[in-house]
Image (tube, rainbow, N blue to C red):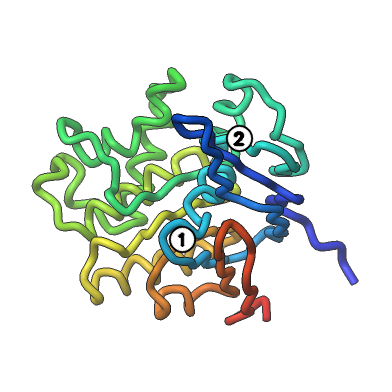
Amino acid sequence: MAEIKMAAQVIDVHKDYVLKGGITVRALRGVSIDFPEGDFVAIMGTSGSGKSTLLNLLGCLDRCSSGKYILAGQDVSQLSDDELSEIRCRYLGFIFQSYNLIAQLTVVENIELPLYYQGNTSKEAKEHCLALAEMVGLKERLDHRPFQLSGGQQQRVAIARALVNNPRVILADEPTGNLDSATGEEIMQLLEALNAAGKTIIMVTHEPDIAARAHRTLRMRDGKLEQHTPTGALA
């Protein structure tokens, strides 16, 4: 049997926050999860369960208090801020519920933004962004600004932006949360196509029907992994 390659692993991860007055909130309590390459995982849980904290750690937007986080074979738990920023750019793409687009920028400019921050303004980079806009169905909207787009179109811009650095792992935080059911279906079909093309997708959602589209569902409760339910292709 071929060895399963891991896109990411968290090993006995704890995350504590110290509030005013010295009160400690234990957001994650010994969480261990493997994410094989090509996985499609839904993370569910009530408010305060730890799912958003886990996604932030996976996205290198926060650090664990103890334990290890292995991304693309590298322990990123002790990396410097600059090193974390670099690994985010190389390996991770982010899709947010609120899209996080820049209102003053056009569709193609929003897609280009990560490359712009890296100083990559080459002709090839521009062509790459145009190709991504076409891939997500926005070829006719390149010069539109976010306020001229529907919610589904804005989320498509966010997905194209997430893909601009060809990440191995896509982290999606409630990607259909602000969309009607028909538009949410379109976004899920797009995510499924990306997964079928080899992208690892880790998605937080509170919607059971959306979670059911993933290969498996992880349920968080009180900072712990409460349940692991295979739901599809990796079952």
Q: Which residue is mark 1?
A: 204
Quarter of the view holding residue 129: top left
Residue 63 - label: 2
Instruction: In the rendered view, tell whether residue 169 sits above or below residue 215.
Output: above
x, y percent for residue 202: 54, 58
Q: Which mark is residue 135?
A: none
Q: Residue at x 26, y 40 (%)?
A: 101
Upstream in sequence: badge 2 or badge 1: 2
In whole angstroms, how far apart are the C-alphas of marks 2 and 1?
19 Å
Is 17 placed above or below 222 here? above
* Residue at (70, 59) in percent of width and height: 33
The image shows residue 62, relative to residue 224, as above or below, that is above
Coordinates of residue 23 in the picture (x, y in percent) = 52, 37
* Amino acid on which the number 2 mark rests in the picture: Arg
Q: Are marks 2 and 1 in contact (CB under 8 Å)?
A: no
Q: Position of residue 165 (x, y in %)?
A: 50, 38
**Residue at image coords 71%, 50%:** 10
Q: Nearer the viewer, residue 140 or 155?
A: 155
Q: Residue furthest front?
A: 21
Secondary structure beneath dot 1 equals: strand
